[in-house]
Amino acid sequence: MADQQVAAGGGLSGSGNAGLVTGILLCLASMSCIQFGAAFSATAIADFGPFATTFLRLVMAAAILAAIVRPPIRSYSRQQWKSALALGATMAAMTLCFFAAIGRIPLGLAVAIEFLGPLAVATWGLGGGWRLIWPLAAFIGVVLLSHDGAGWVGDPVGMLFACGAGVGWGTYIILMKKSGKLFNGLEGLSMSLIVAAVVAAPFGLPRAHEAMSPEGLGMMLGLALLVPLIPYALEMTALRRMPMAAFGILMSLEPALGALAGFLVLSQPMTPFQMLGTALVVAASAGVTSSGSSET
């Protein structure tokens, strides 16, 4: 039974509950980096645009990780290259769409819409039965977080970018899980970040020169560490220690952290209904975690 769960993406690659707990802690650290990194990106996006900001961050993150990991490029198999290319292209599309979205709509709303991608992955991974109550609760929470009490927030283009980021995020979870099995350590992430930087280049190069100052490059370096370098490394490690379904719904904390980061960093207020939405997504995360633990 345990082998069948692993093959289906529902087993633990760590040792029982300890592996699950470690994965949860890594996910929480990753999500905090992503959401507060996104909030701190507001200045860079306003100054240089979302695409140049995304491209420069990916370039710096790829260069730093490649210098540390030193991936043996010539030794990789065809399957490993296909995995790196697919994951890298997905990373680029997801990040470009996400930063374009938060340049147009509030951070909490962008993350709430983006969350629909991993929600779909998690719903598929959990199977049927009573466990479907958790994605349902998370979905209701996302809806509440998407409303400011007076109406739906954001323009249609920004919401479309957020939907694109959601598709990318759901695909990213699946591809990151596979990459973690094909490569040693962080080699798969290193190769994927290089691919992501190349894919993002046509979008980001036209305005990249605007950030070529000590202040601009320093800002980009700090943001590159927060998103994507540290969180992607943490997530790849986490996915080796926990079920993909548990990882997917644990990501339901993202809208809550996004709303919190938007409130603390960008002074984007939260209504009582948005706070209720936060409570629902937290409850969904706790529920799927306990369900995953009981199956180990």
Image (cartoon, rainbow, N blue to C red):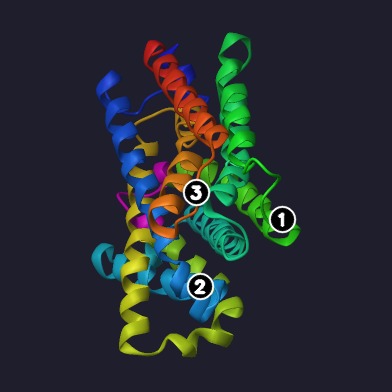
Query: Mark 2 to mark 1: distance in Å?
Result: 18 Å
Q: Nearer the viewer, residue 197 or 183?
A: 197
Residue 240 located left or right of residue 100: left
**Magenta region, residue range:** 180-189
Q: Find residue 58 and report its horizontal and vertical position in percent.
A: 44, 69
Q: Is residue 24 above or below residue 94?
A: above
Q: Which residue is mark 1?
A: 160
Q: Is residue 212 above or below residue 151?
A: below
Residues at badges 3 and 2 in contact (C-beta under 8 Å)?
no
Secondary structure at numbered mark 1: helix
Query: Mark 3 to mark 2: distance in Å?
Result: 21 Å
Q: Nearer the viewer, residue 179 or 137?
A: 137
Q: Is residue 210 above or below residue 278?
A: below
**Camera-side mark, 3 or 2:** 3
**Number of residues whose C-alpha sits closer than 10 Å to that of mark 3, classed few (under 14), some (14–19) or many (20 or more):** some
Quarter where residue 159 is shown = bottom right
Q: For the N terminus, give its image quadrant.
A: top left
Q: For the C terminus, give its image quadrant.
A: top left
Q: Which residue is mark 2?
A: 45
Secondary structure at numbered mark 2: helix
